[in-house]
Amino acid sequence: MTTHRFDLHPWGIGWSCVQNSGWEERGQAHRESVFSLSNGHIGWRGTLDEGDPSAAAGSYLNGVFEEHPMPYAEDGYGYPEHGQTVMHVPDGKVIRLIVDDEPFDIRTGALVEHRQHLDLRTGILHREATWTSPAGRTVTVASQRLVSFTHRSIAAVRYEVTAGDAAVEVTLLSEIVADEPLPEVHSDPRVMDALREPFEPVSHHGAGGRATLVQRTRRSRIAVAVAADHLVTASQANAPEPHTEVTADLARTTVRARLELGESIGLVKCVGHEWSPALDDVALRDRAEAAVESAIEIGWDGLVDEQRQYLDEFWGRVDVRIEGAERLQQSARFSLFQVLQSAARAEVRSIPGKGLTGVGYEGHTFWDAEAFVLPVLTYTAPHAARDALLWRHSTLDHARNRAEQLHLAGAAFPWRTLDGRECSGYWPAGTVAFHVNADIAAAVVRYARATGDEDFEREKGVEILVETARLWCALGRWDDDGAFHIDGVTGPDEYSALVDDNFFTNLMAQRNLRAAADASRRHRDQASALGVAPEEIARWTTTADAMAFPWDAARGIPEQSAGFNAKERWDFEGTRDDQYPLQSHFPYFDLYRKQVVKQADLVLALQIAPDAFTPEQTARAFAYYDELTVRDSSLSASVQSTVAARVGQLDLAMDYFAEAATIDLDDLQDDVDEGLHVAAHAGVWNALVCGFGGMRDDGEMLRFAPRVAPPMTAFSFGMLVRGRTLRVEVQRDAVTYRLADGAALGIRHFDEEITLEAGQPRRLGIPALPDPGPRPSQPRGREPRRADAET
Amino acid sequence: MTTHRFDLHPWGIGWSCVQNSGWEERGQAHRESVFSLSNGHIGWRGTLDEGDPSAAAGSYLNGVFEEHPMPYAEDGYGYPEHGQTVMHVPDGKVIRLIVDDEPFDIRTGALVEHRQHLDLRTGILHREATWTSPAGRTVTVASQRLVSFTHRSIAAVRYEVTAGDAAVEVTLLSEIVADEPLPEVHSDPRVMDALREPFEPVSHHGAGGRATLVQRTRRSRIAVAVAADHLVTASQANAPEPHTEVTADLARTTVRARLELGESIGLVKCVGHEWSPALDDVALRDRAEAAVESAIEIGWDGLVDEQRQYLDEFWGRVDVRIEGAERLQQSARFSLFQVLQSAARAEVRSIPGKGLTGVGYEGHTFWDAEAFVLPVLTYTAPHAARDALLWRHSTLDHARNRAEQLHLAGAAFPWRTLDGRECSGYWPAGTVAFHVNADIAAAVVRYARATGDEDFEREKGVEILVETARLWCALGRWDDDGAFHIDGVTGPDEYSALVDDNFFTNLMAQRNLRAAADASRRHRDQASALGVAPEEIARWTTTADAMAFPWDAARGIPEQSAGFNAKERWDFEGTRDDQYPLQSHFPYFDLYRKQVVKQADLVLALQIAPDAFTPEQTARAFAYYDELTVRDSSLSASVQSTVAARVGQLDLAMDYFAEAATIDLDDLQDDVDEGLHVAAHAGVWNALVCGFGGMRDDGEMLRFAPRVAPPMTAFSFGMLVRGRTLRVEVQRDAVTYRLADGAALGIRHFDEEITLEAGQPRRLGIPALPDPGPRPSQPRGREPRRADAET
């Protein structure tokens, strides 16, 4: 059983240690990830203000990366030559403290008390520390930190130190630190060599309380400006003046004061972040400094107020509430907050797998941005979903080039990337995981349908749909019986590869083709401009109609891929607990040739396209694949929870939900040091809303079929639907639908169509749950970890 | 049409240029490979004596390699961490010449005439050059070079310079040069960094005409000693004395003389080569110097005589003669000579894919050593076949470790290696090409049967057969119908991968299992010592009996792998000539999912196991797969020739034979710069003997069914069978079998069993060729290149 690492709180995540327990270095990297702040443009890991000790100091800017050569033991055609890795940009969050000439360092002296608390309602990370120096002087430090949702390039710190037991001399050194070392993001030393000191200085400036560093990456030639300014606050009269020294790699603003007992001195530090792939030193610097000037004018309290207003608006519409299970309540809100943080102000930049919380996956974006994160953003922060799709659209030329290189047509979006170019160095689970294209297309369709944003669909969406549809036509082949097959690809499950007719891929491709045909008919001018003739539209439709779907007739279930269910079953009984994740203990070839599923694949098809299956097929298929799924990926538990709930296996659904909700807080995969799993956090919302809420958006009308599962006694969630706010409040026997605003909205409640009017809640009964049959079983030792559901 | 690059000669390969044509730098690397000399222990590329200009100076010692890290873009379980690359050892073949203070350099002054000739009967590389220095002095240089078959560690040069038109001062600088640069054997700069200056000096010695360098590789810790001694010959009285200077990296023996017109001075240089993985500096040096001392005592003429005797003996037994097609005659002998050179004195070391003729494939050994080269050696130089199998046996511990790492049983021999450890960095065509194990087992069975070497079988063979049989049992699986399948492997065809039930693999595995059972029954003590119980033997037999073989019932032919014949056919019509080899122009995933064959796979099964198929099945299968085979590998044409001949497609067989015979001499694959394709040379013998000769060794009795194909009018070959020499002389209408010695030998001539007595030739008629039906076709643009058959 996992020990909970964080304090329980419905609206926050806290961690504290008191004198006797001392400092836990072991968990520090994990806490830095959990306490990360981000607005999708800037990411600040939850490091201590004074910089040391730290596991990974990380400040990130979305889109700032360095290139490196890609090493191969044996080369092959079409292998990407260059990789991309997110970089530590100059770090403006550091404020060092010197007490009577001794540096404040929690590893020395005595740490009387230390608390960190991330407040999800305000978006502020609080820290308080009481420390006695080796020389016996005690001070209390209090800091708050935010990365602004309302000022995209601004992050800010309020820092205050108070003399605790006697008069002390204190010096505050507020810094911008360049060249903070990068953790080992790649096992190849040559790659790491290329990423060592990735920035070269361009210019540096400083005077009074102000400082700016401008730097540029050596290979990718991306310029970054980080500027800071300070307000000094003091409890005594005559606050001391700051002064600043700057070199190419370090800006240091110093404030000195003598504090009598109980007196305090503080700083408000506003840090502005700008970057550009085309260097204009002066323009970049001007933008960063202007942002800082504006933030300083607003002041700390103003920034905090704006942050609070932004989040009040967010939570007011889409808060998730879970009653009867405090830890689930806490983690569900934490997860939704992380999804927001990853994308709120990304603004036509990617949503990396780890957000801006660490260097895991080298900062790359994968298919799960569209398949997991965008469904949540579409209904909770649709502007952010739009921006993410605009980013994909902006990379279409790279995707077209890649398709051409592969002798295909249309666009082949990359498996992993920072700027849109393929960075996957292992093609059996990279290049050929073509489903990423259909996942992007599905996100376009979902966004357009959920928001009614016709401008987007016409100006950008059509092009994505058309180019991805073209890819499928070029990739597949017709058999003699008139069926269309997609051979030799890899689906979501990474323990299978190079399979024929992956059901998920074919289903998503079918919908992609139909959506392209549909959108091209509705936006004839845009389609024509893309060279779409009526024959091509007809071809997409006939191809979609002819799509092959592998079927296990004996079991009456869809098959993950052609022949999958006839493969040898993995020896689960002979696999020891310490041999998971399997990929770290067995060769790929053995995983690939056997029935063993890393992560929901066919079950993800059941979740995304429930209309393609009867309820009986869904239940049988879920039970069959649950026996084979080892969940060696953070992307699986939430999907299994969703489908378990839909087939009425509520107890199992809750077990999976509890696991999904704590993957990062309890570090179930032992890799949170490198950053949070944003898509897994999105999965928590998906499981709550689509699983327990029974929400389906596969038709024109949203459908709900909610059911409460113990230990929760009730839950509710909000969604933005075509500009209106819909709240769904679920209790054991009834559900209340509240439309806050806007025109009437038709939805389905179980099999009943109803129309909601703004301000007129509808309370409807929940029908009895049919007997779902026996609980599906899992591979030995891979049962879901229920522990965390109970509090 | 290819221009023939070498002079036509039945017993040699010559190349010459005269004044007007000048020096062809372009073809130099190719010529260096073609003129390589080797005895399987030492390899000397056919460089010019004076060292410069050279493409790759290369002296090699079989087994001397350096380790390097293996780079991966993305890591995986079981990927080899270290690679191995053959190294340039200190090069003792260099003799520089200075004429009146001007260095002899064919790029300066005027090259009046230059000839090189490799004499296949004597094993000597001749060179003659007449050169006028920029200052107008003309000299003639004549050298002969040999790598001794009778003195394993000795290579020698006889070098003579004659004053051509006036008196000259000449200086001969005979060197041992360390750290000659390695060509780029790997695309990863980090790997090349690890291979730069791989040797560190250990000691150096020199006096009079003698010199020795001892060095050691930095990572693999292999010590090498190269020693030289010289005899000076002069046409005038009082030959000058040599003197020697040595530094850690260079030994230089100098001889100076003034030559009057027509006078000459010469050197005989004997170079000794020793190495050891465990350094004992003194012992190593002693062995190298003792070898040199002995060679000097024998003298140049003695070494030449021994070389000639060795080759007389070889050619006397197993010469291949082709009448009516001079170029085929030349290349057939060249090919057999190269097979001999690759292995004659390897003595429990590997036979690399390129022999010791270049750095191609990093000097690695592959499955083709056993599948292509050993069949030839077994019948032409059986001691060398034995040694090669002893080497595989000596690597069994590495193979057992690899099997354990892969969670298998028995032994998993490496796909590519120098010392027995897996060095393949691309597992879909490496690790999972498990057929290498059955290829080794088949070579054991063939060798034991052909030679009657029961000691070998008992002491070494049984263990190889048992451990490989164990691998197959662990690798495959039983289905519900009682069939045994081997899933997810790669067969010989590298344009398919991760297939189920590769027919070739399963057939070879079946025979491996049966051979293990058979050998274990005959050698009970050895089997018991390996832990083989009767139940295990029974298991091998039942497993072999249950082996699954994919079959295309509609076409009545075996299928390359399960489902292969239902895959999409490659768009051969849409593939341009300049898009071959396909692997350089298309991504693997696209090759893997389509019907396109890089190299004989199912057709290799037809060649190796003709008893498994009816003649009709063979003909149909050959025709079907010939349409799909693009021959992007040097291992294909000979196999296609063999099977074409067996099914009576003699014209096509000759076309393939002509191509196979000139792959290296005409550099058809544009890669001979990096060394010769030893297995392709072996294929020439296989095609002649097993194809046109119709030789089959799949039963207890050898079978022949020879047929002459135009343009050849007759051919003959010799074989060693259980210690006896059998010669087969084929004419258009009859064949004569001659047993030279030993007890009577039963063979089959077509369907007739006959008994041969020593000294009593049997002449038998050749039955009329049944109509073989239409000539099979090939992919557009990939028809065999007939041109070279005609002279």
Image (cartoon, coloured by chain):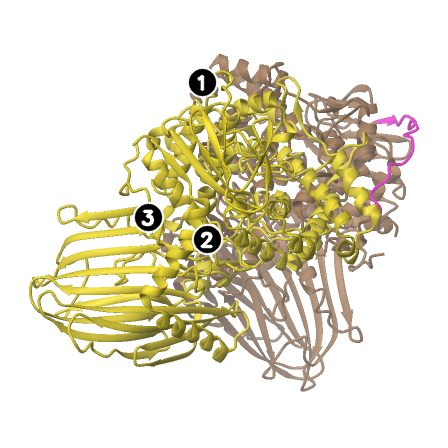
Chain colours: A brown, B yellow
Residue type, mark 3 in image: His
Secondary-structure class at tag 3: helix
- Upstream in sequence: badge 2 or badge 3: 3
Rendered image: mark on residue A130:
none
Residue B713 in the image: state x and y as whole percent: 37, 29
Magenta-highlighted residues: A763-780
Secondary-structure class at tag 2: helix
Q: Which residue is mark 3?
A: B30
Rendered image: mark on residue A528:
1
Subunit of mark 2?
Answer: B
Residue type, mark 2 in image: Ser
**Discs 2, 1: same chain:** no
Q: Determine the main secondary structure of the stretch shown in magenta.
A: loop
Subunit of mark 1?
Answer: A
Question: In the displayed structure, does residue B8 sit left or right of residue B605?
Answer: left
Residue at x 61% of width, y 71% of height: A52
Can you tell which of label 3 and label 1 is closer to the viewer? 3
Q: Which residue is mark 2?
A: B342
Quadrant of the rendered image containing residue A211:
bottom left
